[in-house]
Image (spheres, helix red, strand yellow):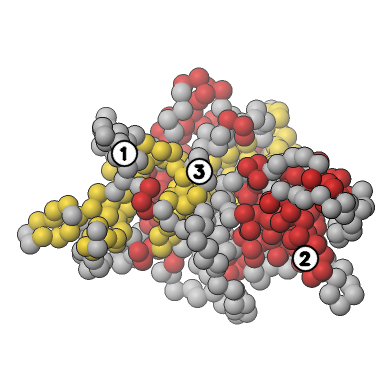
């Protein structure tokens, strides 16, 4: 296992389950369960499970689902549990990694011993972190689009992808169209919209009551703000799909959902768990820490407030320098350095992210930068696919610019972070460099084309 292909997120207790991917193990045969993003199961009867590679299981899943060849690039196999998520390399052996799961938890999580003892990973077939968004726009196979749609929808509803209310309503309307069909006032499906509101909107926007149902029936009652916006957006989806007198195919709505998600800067990211210092407040200057999710993709890094569900800091790779420290008997830290100002003075800002996954995050940042600098314009050749992008593929269509709303949840809130500010002062560096001419750290976008350093919990984890 290595850090570039691992998303070491830490889901909440509500997401925990006891499902397993291996239902029986014999000397030669086993039944393996691979979960899709919508929680459906793909059962596989395999031989010699202990020596079976992730690539072989990936191929078996594609054959059962009858997916086209592009699925090799789009999806990857993950080992997932409530405590840790790891994207597998093709050569990894899932059964052996599963047996070493407690060792991974002890190294990369702060979970209590009792939780480590009870935790059991399962195999999931989901989006490859290293698959570029621009290539996703070229996909036409409806089943591939559906799988991507289901995964993105789950992340939106769980608020793993924080969204503004307007975006939640637009995305929820597309889910309504997929699940309930075209909007028709008064039809029985309107009842489903009211009864299953949490299937269309994140939980914090769901305000159950009679108002939405009455509004759908046209009785003049007013729905709540989120509900009314969902209803209006649902109507607009039908108006668009009915243009020209024909009903749009489901694949059209899957694609529309994904295009909307592409406006979110953290779509397709790997997620990690950490904590940051709070700004000092009050007479006693009490601070403390707040839990965050660190989202890393081919484009940059986003730090998300896990409780408030909004972005604290968003940086493209050309806007940051980074490093990590893992001193003995001290908490590992991922350091992010970026340009800012202090009372109008240009300064460099240092953000400390406390996390046992700091090494994984640092390795993933380095690998994403190497991929972004690769000389393959149509898309990087990532280690999870083993095949380069097709250079003859058509260019991606131009996307609309992202909406810049005042107070948007995707806008950085640096004032909510406690950073170390410093400037270069002669021979030394003192706290309170405007440009990235030099840096406190040597690891930046301009780093050389060195080989990627594998993060290994133990020598026995790398197979072959």
In percent of width and height, residue 83 lies at 52, 33
Q: Secondary structure at mark 2?
A: helix
| Residue 104 visible to an observer of this rendering | yes
Mark pair 3, 1: CA separation: 18 Å
In percent of width and height, residue 375 lies at 44, 74
| Residue 180 visible to an observer of this rendering | no
Q: Nearer the viewer, residue 357 or 382?
A: 357
The residue lying at 65 percent from left, 54 percent from top is 168
Judging by the rendered image, the residue that carries numbered circle 2 is 236
Instruction: Answer few, some or many: residues within 10 Å of disc 1's Cα (few below 14, many 20 plus, some between 14 and 19).
Output: few
The residue lying at 47 percent from left, 58 percent from top is 411
**Label for residue 281?**
1
Mark pair 2, 3: CA separation: 30 Å
Residue 54 versus residue 400 in the image, above or below: above
In percent of width and height, residue 361 lies at 40, 48
Mark pair 1, 2: CA separation: 46 Å
């Amino acid at each position: 296992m290595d850090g570039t292909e691992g998303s070491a997120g830490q889901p909440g207790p509500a997401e925990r389950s006891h499902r397993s991917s291996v239902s029986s193990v014999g000397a030669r045969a086993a039944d393996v369960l691979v979960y899709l993003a919508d929680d459906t199961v793909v059962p596989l009867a395999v031989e010699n499970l202990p020596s079976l590679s992730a690539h072989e299981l990936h191929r078996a899943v594609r054959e059962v689902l009858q997916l086209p060849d592009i699925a090799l690039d789009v999806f990857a196999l993950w080992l997932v549990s409530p405590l840790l998520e790891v994207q597998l390399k093709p050569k990894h052996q899932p059964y052996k990694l599963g047996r070493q799961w407690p060792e991974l938890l002890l190294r990369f999580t702060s979970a209590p011993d009792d939780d480590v003892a009870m935790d059991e990973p399962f195999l999931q077939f989901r989006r490859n972190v290293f698959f570029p968004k621009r290539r996703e726009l070229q996909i036409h196979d409806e089943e591939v689009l559906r799988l991507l749609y289901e995964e993105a929808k789950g992340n939106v509803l769980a608020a793993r992808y924080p969204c503004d209310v307007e975006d939640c309503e637009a995305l929820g309307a597309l889910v309504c169209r997929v699940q309930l069909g075209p909007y028709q006032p008064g039809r029985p499906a309107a009842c489903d919209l009211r009864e299953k509101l949490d299937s269309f909107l994140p939980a914090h926007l769901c305000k159950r009551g009679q108002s939405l149902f009455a509004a759908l029936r046209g009785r003049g009652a007013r729905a709540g703000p989120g509900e009314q916006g969902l209803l209006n957006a649902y109507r607009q989806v039908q108006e668009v799909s009915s243009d020209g007198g024909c009903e749009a195919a489901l694949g059209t709505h899957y694609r529309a959902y994904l295009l909307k998600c592409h406006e979110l800067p953290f779509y397709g990211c790997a997620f990690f768990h950490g904590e940051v210092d709070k700004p000092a407040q009050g007479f006693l200057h009490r601070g403390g820490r707040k839990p965050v999710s660190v989202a890393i993709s081919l484009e940059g890094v986003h730090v998300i407030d896990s409780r408030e569900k909004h972005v604290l800091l968003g940086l493209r790779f050309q806007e940051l320098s980074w490093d990590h420290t893992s001193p003995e008997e001290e908490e590992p830290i991922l350091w992010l350095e970026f340009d800012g100002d202090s009372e109008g003075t240009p300064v460099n800002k240092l953000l400390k992210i406390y996390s046992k996954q700091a090494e994984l995050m640092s390795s993933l940042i380095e690998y994403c930068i190497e991929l972004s600098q690769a000389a393959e314009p149509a898309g990087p050749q990532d280690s999870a696919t083993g095949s380069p992008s097709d250079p003859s593929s058509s260019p991606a269509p131009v996307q609309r610019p992202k909406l810049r709303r005042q107070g948007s949840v995707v806008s950085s809130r640096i004032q909510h972070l406690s950073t170390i500010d410093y400037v270069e002062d002669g021979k030394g560096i003192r706290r309170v460099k405007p440009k990235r001419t030099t840096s406190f750290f040597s690891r930046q976008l301009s780093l050389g084309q060195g080989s990627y350093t594998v993060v290994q919990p133990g020598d026995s984890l790398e197979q072959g």
